[in-house]
Amino acid sequence: MGTLWGGRFTKQTDAVVAEFTNSIHFDHVLAKYDCLASLAHIAVLKKTKLLTISEHRQLEGGLNRILKSIDAGTFMPDFQFEDIHSYIQHLLEKDKRVGKAALKLHTCRSRNDQVTLDTKIYCLDQILGIERQLTILIQNLTELADKNAHIVMPGFTHLQHAIPVALFDQLNAYCEMFRRDEVRLMNIFESIRLYMGAGAVAGTMIPSANYQQKLSVDFHKDIEPPICPVDTVSDRDFVLDMLYAEAMIGQHLSRMAEDLILWATKEFDFIDIDDAFCTGSSLMPNKKNPDVLEMVRGYAGRLYGNLTSVFIMMKGLPLSYNRDMQLDKEPLFESTDLILKELAVVAALVKNIKFKESSIQDQLEDECLYATDIADHLVKNGVAFKDAHRIVGELIKYKIDQNVELRALSEAELHRIHPSLSQDIINRVINPQRSISEKKSIKRGK
Ligand code: ARG
């Protein structure tokens, strides 16, 4: 198959070598971005008079026809080609309306520069896609939190029942994680500089000013001449930034998945996950399993692995471009596709969660949950916190040892534990709504 090189070779590439080095079976994902980058490149060539106006028009027409076929879903990459760049070159050469102009496309261009720019544009586009999905997930979580804002539930630390917490805050914790993910992605978006003109490593003969132009899609990003061509073709920081941001989203999703898995168990019994988002057992007819959430939890490992694999691949690479760097793409594409899929399925799942209010209410009956509230109350009445902590600790110990309800203790028993305790305090403080309303430190609203 036609390659972008070959003149100095006396032999055909061995079939095993082609099979081993070809990347089109995965880098065809870059087709759209390669065409966009090529449209920018031919504008530079026209400006530099390395293309005539009609040659430019011919190439532009050819590239736009390919873009149209990608949009229409009819673009079928031929996996016998080395990579997507060679295949697009081939399509242009084959396109009668482009004619001989196709042979000028690669003027002053190296795939080292081309693939870096293509991958950067891919990252920009995917960031916007992930961002859209994150917004939907945050919106669905916020709606769920608002709808159930009246619910108080046991809060956990060390996975032990700790103190009542507002369900709203519990769900908003995930929103906060995903909001940080949005900021992280937008920072990466801002940091990506679209350089063109690095050539293979040393720059090209085209004056730098001619490289300055708009990218033909609406990314609000300019293409600029390289500040350092050696760095431009060596840089894969942006790939690692993407993989890190995706691994982080994967971590957040997996933590939320784990909570929801626990909450759906008989032991916790806080939520019901809609049947449409669960699967069954082939043997046990009673089973309803949270497989979606288990896979979300499991995929975090894949996302971390993809980040690690590119980190290790880049370690110690000499300047500038090395073919090792082709190995950045499968992890990048896989992590991006995974995150998009995970966000879509989790957003739909959370929308359909039902909270089991009476079961949650039953669990709030545990008087131990209010120990801190009783201590706070004593503090408000002038007891030093360290003393209050000890007094309530003794009260809880008495409750456990005697296997009694605090609310059932007599005034005399309470006084014997400590004179500052009373039935009135116990009855007033053991109340989930009061517990929540006493928490004044939280900044509510925007
Ligand atoms: N497929 C290559 C990659 O993804 C494109 C660059 C190839 N350059 C080269 N000089 N062989 O990295």
Image (cartoon, grey):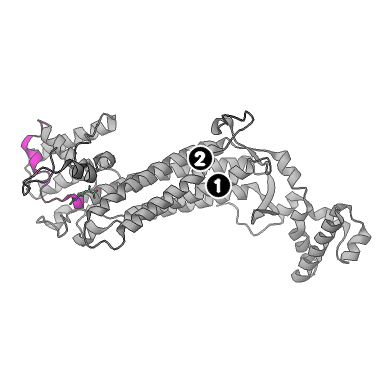
| Quarter of the rendering occupied by the N terminus | top left
- Badge count: 2
Q: Secondary structure at mark 1?
A: helix
Does the magenta-highlighted stretch encompass residue 101?
yes
What amino acid does circle 1 point to? Met
Residue drawn at (37%, 52%), measured in percent from left and top?
242
Q: Amino acid at mark 2?
A: Val
Residue at mark 1: C-beta within 8 A of ligand 1: no
Dot 1, how many residues are within 10 Å of its Cα: few (below 14), some (14-19), or many (20+)?
many
Q: Secondary structure at mark 2?
A: helix
| Residue 82 visible in the picture | no
Magenta residue span: 95-113
> What residue is shown at x 23% (from left), y 63% (from top)?
318
- Mark 1 lies on residue: 256
Residue found farthest to the right: 412
**Residue holding disc 2:** 346
User: Residue 144 vs residue 226: left or right?
Assistant: right
Measure how far apart labels 1 and 2 are at the Cα level: 10 Å
Whole-percent x and y of residue 157?
64, 56
Residue 425 horizontal/vertical position (percent): 84, 58
Position of residue 98 relative to residue 402, above or below, is above
| Residue 191 image point, x, y percent | 33, 57
Does label 1 or label 2 sit earlier along the sequence?
1
**Drawn side of residue 29 relative to residue 256, left or right:** left
Q: Which residue is nearer to you in this view: 218 or 300?
A: 300
Neighbour class for label 2 at 10 Å: few (<14), some, many (≥20)?
many
Quarter occupied by residue 17: top left
Q: Quadrant of residue 278?
A: top right
